[in-house]
Amino acid sequence: MISALALAGALWLAMPPAHAADAVPFDSLTPAEQRILQSTRERWDTLPPERQEALRRGAARWQQMTPEQRTLARERLKRWQAMSPEQREQLRSRYERFRALPPEEQERLRRGLQWFEGLPPERRAEIRNRWQNMSPEERQAFRERVQSMSPEERRAARDKWESLSPEQREAARDRWRRMTPEERQRLRRERRRGQ
């Protein structure tokens, strides 16, 4: 119950303000909403109408979730609660930047996240580790390289990379690191011509 409320509160943080004009008495909530929001009962009447409405929407989403989705939501809430205020602010800022993107770009990013989450845990850890070990310049170069590719080119590159053994991947990374920017650019042009 408490985790449901905490989840509803976390969901409220990510939602735009509601346009509810009037407060809603706790007793007028549906039995399911009352059950989910029970821990707010004592202070419900002191909450602004917008917050009440946001919590009700969160409760409605909670009711629609499958058990697996609820488990995932609880895990996300635990991670949120474990974050420092600075980390939470960074996450809010990233979320706002995401919301400002065109819908097509948001969808592209969602598909990428789904692909990533579908990978085995060891592979996700390998990718995270590689990213964390990149310098800011390497990260920016990687972003630019990927953004300049068509979806088909990205898919082909990902498939090719996935087909390599761990040793081959490490050797390719080493070769890439030793290249000058001009050599990297020339290699990209040659690869595009060869496709």
Image (tube, helix red, strand yellow):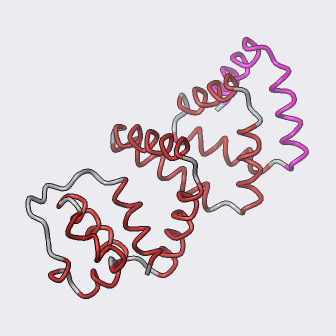
Label tally: 0
Q: Is residue 46 left or right of residue 166?
A: left
State the residue lying farthest toward the left: 21
Q: Where is residue 138 in the image (x, y as percent from the top left)?
A: 70, 26
Identify the image quadrant of residue 175: top right
Identify the image quadrant of residue 53: bottom left
The answer to if 177 sits in the magenta stretch is: yes
Query: Over which residues does the magenta segment extend?
Result: 165-194
State the residue lying farthest toward the bottom: 31
- At 43% from the left and 68% from the top, the residue drawn is 6
Q: In this view, does 76 lie to the left or right of 128?
A: left
Q: Position of residue 110 (x, y in %)?
A: 47, 52
Q: Where is residue 49 in the image (x, y as percent from the top left)?
A: 17, 61
**Magenta part, dominant SS:** helix
Q: Where is residue 133 in the image (x, y as percent from the top left)?
A: 77, 35
Q: In this view, does 174 lie above or below 2?
A: above
Question: Which quarter of the figure is the N terminus placed in?
Answer: bottom left
Identify the image quadrant of residue 148: top right
Q: Is residue 46 above or below residue 28?
A: above
- At 46% from the left and 46% from the top, the residue drawn is 108
Q: In this view, does 10 lie to the left or right of 45?
A: right
Q: Which one is nearer the viewer's eye here, 130 or 49?
A: 49
Question: Which quarter of the figure is the C terminus placed in?
Answer: top right
The answer to if 185 sits in the magenta stretch is: yes
Q: Which one is nearer the viewer's eye here, 129 or 105?
A: 129
- At 57% from the left and 26% from the top, the residue drawn is 144
Q: Is residue 147 above or below residue 124?
A: above
Q: In this view, does 3 lie to the left or right of 13?
A: right
Q: Which one is nearer the viewer's eye here, 186 or 56?
A: 56
